[in-house]
Amino acid sequence: MQYVLLFLLALAAPASAAWRRVDTPNFIVVGDVSVRQLRNVATKFEGFHEALRHVLPSATTTAPVPTVVIVFPNDAAFAPYRPTYQGKARADVAGYAAAGLDVNYIAMLDLGDSSERVIFHEYTHMILANAVARMPVWLNEGLAEFYSTFALMDGGKRAQIGRPIVEHLQLLHGSVRVPLAELLKVDTQSPLYNEGTRASDFYAESWALTHMLLNGQPPRVDQLSDYLRRVGDGTVPAEAWETVFGTERTENELRRYVTKPTYTTVVIDFSEKIVAVPAVERPLSTGDAAAFLAAIQQRRGAGGDAARLLEPALSAQPSNVLAQAAMARVEIARGDAPAAEKRLMALDASDDWFAAYQAGLALLESAERQHGMSGIAPALARSTQWLQQVRKDHGELPNVLASLARIELEGEKPSAAARDHIARARALAPGRVDYALTQAEIFAEARDFANARRVVGPLMSSLYPEDVRNGARRLMAGLVELERAVSGGPAIAPSGRSRSVGVPDADAGKPPRESGGSARFVPAFRRVEAGEHRLEGTLERIDCPAGGPARFAVREPAGVTTLGVARMTDVDFISYRDDLSGSVSCGALKEPIRVYVTWKDGASPAAEKVVVAVEFLPKN
């Protein structure tokens, strides 16, 4: 009973605590601590952001979404919001960052350096994800550790980064514990990245290698940029490293570097004191505080706890826009988009830009969940009003620009303004894959299929995670389907342009395997699921008649097998070839291609073989 009472008191904390909010150009800092404490936290974060801006392109340090920092006064207040592992709260965590497509959240205890290093580490990841779509894991973690040592100096006039990390140096103890070739190929699934002491070795050595490249004498920033460019262009990371740095030579240099008695740091002079950055205190009601805490609970997957925080707040303040938007998010997560839309459409205007932002995005999401249903036009119009209000003070916030473009995709044909909005959002946030997909859809709506494919094509390479590649493949197939329908329609004359099915290079970037003295790609073929069958043969043609099902003609030893599919979007196209141009034209192929075709039985009575996946096999 005592535990239940304490839990309920923790949930009800916003009702009795003196919550405050401070807005700065790049952060919203809230908490039931003093304004002075909030301002101090905000000053450190603004200083860190400014330090990153000095070493990264200014466009990519513009966060695509607002970043909210929630400061808890003590461990008891923080306890209900701690991250969990295997169902248990992690008592060893003093702060964490939860990146999101709409809002980034940072929850922390203000304990000085011990908590700030963790937060600065995670915030660096957020910025890097915005700036670079794909980065080797060792460098991603090495940079985050390097910048995590940030400290303001001289009353905010200067900052220091790249300070030695004592625990890493003690662990390494003057030696290289992980062979460099192994370090360079670690991914997020590797035991070296995930297992206890081995992960500690990985983090320490990643930091040391990054420190040597950035702060060694001479620094090798230009070579590191060249390495990243080659990896981004599809070169195997190990091959790119060998070309730029030389693996054996770099490992010998690293062994000497970790024995150094002193380490060079970077000192950045700011043009103006960071403490002079504009910081505006805003009133924070009980409903607002509940909304911020509910957002953290929902981000943790605790939707029920989020609702329990919001219900009493909304009973007391039913017109609170931020709390209503938070409750709408709970309803959307429960699958009740119509209820969320009804809740949001009943709201009056708010003079709080962040409340308007949250309401506008929640309303857009509720409309998208009801895609294809009649009656969502008023919701789209109201969402536009909310987001245009945000633009008055935050006109270059990338996610607002991208969301305005998404609204036009749900409604009428996208305008020139929508094309400009998504182009600017992509320029400011090149790491946001969802913005690229939105831009491709806008190109497709304008019947600019060449540019649409140009945007989608790179997303199908193995530089991106499997879920991104799958989404890009589906969109590419949809582009082909739409272009085929358009070019074959009675009111449109044939364009003569090649209609093609996109095929990603699924093995680009994979480490080569030695075979007879030469390297070749080693594919990981698609698994055949229950009810599916696979045949191996040579794809000779793909017939794509307007208005009818597509037909794949595959030559096997016994003759040609014909397989069909009603929609190209139902086919999973995968390539294990490193020499394809990125598309295969409908019609007869100039050069037949070896394939695996996975199929399943169609509905009776025809019992046709229905294509599920086409895998383009390596030449050898």
Image (cartoon, grey):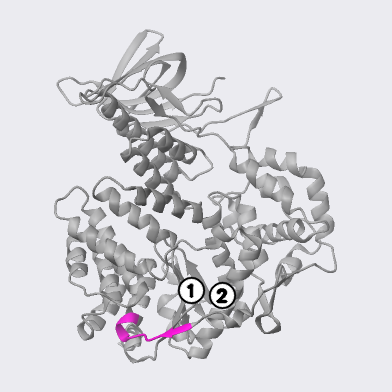
Give the structural element (helix, strand or loop) at label 1. loop
- Distance between the alpha carbons at the discs numbered 1 and 2: 8 Å
- Residue drawn at the location 17% of the way across and 19% of the way down: 606
Determine which quarter of the picture holds residue 47. Answer: bottom right
Q: Which residue is mark 1?
A: 27
Q: Could you tell me if the residues under marks 1 and 2 are in contact, i.e. CB atoms within 8 Å? A: yes
Q: Which residue is mark 2?
A: 45
Q: Which residues are magenta?
A: 280-288
Tell me residue 582's x, y (percent): 48, 29
**In terms of depth relative to the viewer, which is nearer, 283 or 177?**
283
Q: Is residue 466 above or below residue 198?
A: above
Mark sitting earlier along the chain (1/2): 1
- Residue drawn at the location 20% of the way across and 53% of the way down: 370
From where the camera sits, is residue 530 visible?
Answer: no
What amino acid is labelled 2 in the image?
Phe
- Residue drawn at the location 31% of the way across and 63% of the way down: 361
Residue furthest front in the image: 416
Tell me residue 580's x, y (percent): 51, 25
